[in-house]
Amino acid sequence: MEKTIVIIGGVAGGADIAAGLRKLDENAHIILFEKDEYSSYADCGSPYYSGDGMKEREELPVTTPAIMKDRFHIDIRIKNEVIEIDRSYKTVLIKSRKTDKTYLQPYDILVLL
């Protein structure tokens, strides 16, 4: 039976955890929720952005949801904010920042960042 793993939070940590979980379980349905528009970027480059090394945030290397889907079969949902966790029913309530609609996502394993 396929497990659903929900990861709340992207950036470097969420993407690394998702990729590591994929190595442990090839069949799990892994979903990463990120409320902003970037699912993952090179967090280690942030000092260059805040210093004089980079002028624009867009210069930070970015891993797109499409790349993560193709390479690791991970479902990354950007602009989707987790607004409630119900541990007793193992669901998260998600609000799409694109449509302002909410929906429930069940999970077997929950990872919070």
Image (cartoon, grey):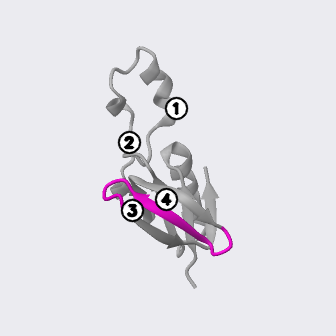
Cα separation, mark 3 vs mark 1, equals: 23 Å
Estimate the x, y position of residue 9 in percent, counting from the top left: 53, 50
Which class describes the residues within 10 Å of circle 1: few (<14), some (14-19), or many (20+)?
few
Amino acid type assigned to the residue bearing label 4 in the image: Leu
Cα separation, mark 2 vs mark 4, equals: 16 Å
Extreme-bottom residue of the structure: 1
In front: 84, or 46? Answer: 84
Secondary structure character of the magenta stretch overall: loop
Amino acid type assigned to the residue bearing label 2 in the image: Val
Estimate the x, y position of residue 104 in percent, counting from the top left: 48, 71
Give the residue pinned by disc 2: 62
**Element marked by disc 1:** helix
Mark 4 vs 3: CB contact within 8 A? no
Estimate the x, y position of residue 19 in percent, counting from the top left: 53, 57
Q: Which residue appears at 37% of the width and 21% of the height?
A: 54
Q: Which residue appears at 55% of the width and 55% of the height?
A: 8
Which class describes the residues within 10 Å of circle 4: few (<14), some (14-19), or many (20+)?
many
Amino acid type assigned to the residue bearing label 1 in the image: Cys
Give the residue pinned by disc 1: 44
**Whether residue 48 is situated above or below residue 69 in the rendered picture:** above
Cα separation, mark 4 vs mark 3, equals: 11 Å
Which class describes the residues within 10 Å of circle 3: few (<14), some (14-19), or many (20+)?
few
Give the residue pinned by disc 3: 69
Q: Name which quarter of the figure residue 92 lies in.
A: bottom right
Estimate the x, y position of residue 37 in percent, counting from the top left: 36, 46
**Element marked by disc 3:** helix
In front: 3, or 25? Answer: 3
Q: Name which quarter of the figure residue 68 lies in.
A: bottom left
Mark 1 vs 4: CB contact within 8 A? no
Magenta part of the chain: 87-101
**Element marked by disc 4:** strand
Give the residue pinned by disc 4: 32
